[in-house]
Image (cartoon, helix red, strand yellow):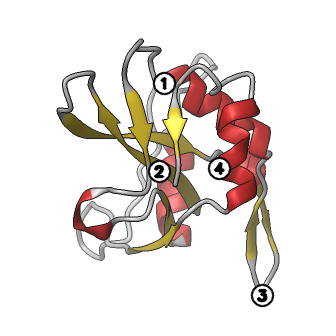
Amino acid sequence: MYDVIIRFRYREIDPLGGSSEHYVDWNQTDQNVSVTPQEVVFRFVKNDFFSIVGAYVPDKPGYTRRIDSLNNNLRSVEYIIVEGSEDLQTYYQLHLPTTGVVQELPTFTTVQNGLGLFTSRIVKTLHFTPNRVTQAAFDTSQYTKTKNFQFN
């Protein structure tokens, strides 16, 4: 079971010079995953990224947004990769909403002489800064050109 969240961080500066940090999470779905024995590949379209950022960052006249001066030297793009065990995937699949007449959930346990789920997952994070081409696209994308992102 795999999940990827792409977190985009930015600093918002109001007209009086006050600033606050914000982020937008873009949750990748299982339909973007292809799994082979050697690797897991998530595919996404860059234009979709700009669409998500544009949808969640409000237009605020007079405000500027920066990604090059975040607190604690954070980078603006963070990939959060979560991998869960096969038992965890089975548990989630069994507990999806039912569409049939039977509403009782099946019992699933990995605990001997009891009920419960003893499993694991791993979380890995990777940090990036958008390259110059991506930075320039914030000014030209139909979704983000009104958001006033500025770069050095």
Q: Residues within 10 Å of mark 3 (few under 14, many from 20)?
A: few
| Local SS, label 3 | loop
Q: Which mark is residue 56?
A: 1
| Residue 30 falls left or right of residue 111 | right
From where the camera sits, is residue 102 visible? no
Return the disc, 2 or 3, that comes first in the chain's sequence: 2
Q: CA distance from mark 2 to mark 3?
A: 26 Å
Disc 4/disc 2 C-alpha distance (Å):
16 Å
Q: Nearer the viewer, mark 4 or mark 3?
A: 4
Residue at image point 80% right, 45% down: 45
Name the residue: 31% across, 56% down: 70
> In the picture shown, does residue 36 fall above or below 48?
below
The amino acid sitting under disc 3 is Gln
Q: State the SS at label 1.
A: helix
* First in residue order: circle 1 vs circle 2: 2
Which residue was labeled with disc 2?
Answer: 7
Query: Pointer 4: what residue?
Result: 135
Mark 4 or 2, which is nearer the eye?
4
> What x and y, as percent, mark residue 56?
48, 24
Residue 22, quarter of the rendered image = top left
Q: Nearer the viewer, mark 3 or mark 1?
A: 1
Q: Secondary structure at mark 4?
A: helix
Q: Quadrant of the N terminus?
A: bottom right
Location of residue 12 (image quadrant): top left
Label at residue 48: none
> Mark 3 — residue?
38
Of mark 1 and mark 4, the one earlier in the sequence is: 1
